[in-house]
Amino acid sequence: MFGFGQLIAVLKKNPKKIVFTEGEDARILEAASRLLASNFLHPILIGSEEKIAIAAEDCGFNIRGAEIIDPEKYDNMDEMIDMFCELRKSKGVTPEQARHTLYQANYFGTMLVKMGIADSLLGGATYSTADTVRPALQLIKTKPQNNIVSSCFILVRPSATGENEVLAMADCAININPTEDELVEIAGEAAECAKIFGVEPQLAFLSYSTHGSGAGEAVDKMRNAAQKAKIKYPDLPIDGELQFDAAVSPRVARTKCPDSKVGGHANTFIFPDISSGNIGYKIAQRMGNFDAYGPILLGLNAPVNDLSRGCNASEVYSMAIITAALS
Ligand SMILES: CC(C)(COP(=O)(O)OP(=O)(O)OC[C@H]1O[C@@H](n2cnc3c(N)ncnc32)[C@H](O)[C@@H]1OP(=O)(O)O)[C@@H](O)C(=O)NCCC(=O)NCCS
């Protein structure tokens, strides 16, 4: 079962560099100081060297050894502008527009990953999800075999036996109303993500209906998507449409879907849309005592992740490790 020790062990064998777009933020500085105290993940802080030094001193965090890059003083800005214009040539971006855009830390940091100067990026302590994710969609882009970028939350609840309970939920943060085919892709990516965290994925396509107990377009969408996913991923246990109780409670599953192999045991949940997904993971987090890690972006060519603006330093530290371990 998942523990951060496993991810840290991976990084110790192969240390990585991670960009933090909000270099002056106290939570980022605290997480960076913790990372610098070990040597498996090297932070690159974006911002003014002077302002970052003052902020770190004010907060009492030792960030000696951190790489600080100020977009306005970056030596290779011309090379970055050329590459940015090339990547956005279909949009007719001029070098002047590129320079203006690249002075923004979210775009600048994303280009550092694109240019191979960093392995991954973590932002969103102050930027919105859209402003953190959009540069990655435009510049890092989807993997060749993928059609969309999606996301997954990993939920971890320590149990009395010492075995963590680990679940995956998708897509709770990116695709607002995914199509059947997009749900199939989201399910495949979420299953791969779940495996990284030690989960043997059992996928439930969630709905307000179990095996035809209810009717409607939204029910058809989840049933059809589950059917398509079973064909695309024959080795994965998949079922749907399932209500959440039928998906997780063996007793309810015996009544509502007695022939289902997944019913009662699901651990990887595919939601019909972002509203249900986002509300669902937050209920698990706030009322079910699960720690929520994510959104972990899936399907990008390099790992970029988004923090909640309400995050604390400990969450920044954990997400940095998760993000880097995926690179
Ligand atoms: C992801 C999101 C930010 C994209 O919004 P956007 O930037 O307004 O989207 P646009 O349609 O303008 O697309 C911008 C670029 O991203 C690409 N893109 C958009 N969604 C994409 C996806 N799911 N996968 C891959 N690429 C995507 C577009 O093709 C476009 O590329 P281009 O500029 O090269 O043509 C939007 O879907 C969103 O706001 N999702 C919800 C985020 C949220 O609020 N989450 C809840 C809090 S966690």
Image (spheres, rainbow, N blue to C red):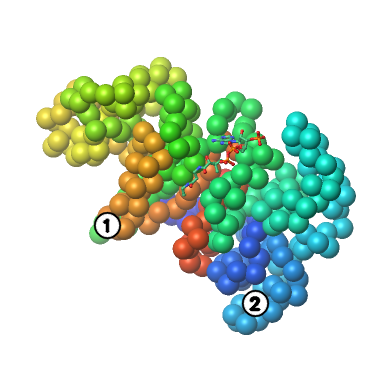
| Crowd tier of the residue under label 2, counting other residues whose Cα lies within 10 Å: few below 14, some 14–19, many 20 or above | many
Three-letter residue code for mark 1: Met
Which mark is drawn over residue 287? 1
Instruction: Work out whether residue 85 or residue 123 is closer to the camera in this orientation and state it.
Output: 85
- Report the front residue among 186 and 107: 107
* Residue 89 makes an appearance in the image: yes
Q: Quick check: 258 above or below 125?
A: above
Residue 182 vs residue 155: left or right? right
Describe residue 285's horizontal placement relative to residue 251 as left or right: right
Viewer-proximal residue among 141 and 119:
141
User: Residue 223: horizontal and vertical position, in percent?
Assistant: 31, 22
Give the residue pinned by disc 2.
56
Q: Quadrant of residue 292?
A: bottom left
User: Residue 64, labelled with which disc?
Assistant: none
> Is 236 on the left or on the right of 312, as rendered?
left
Whole-percent x, y for residue 194 in the image: 43, 40
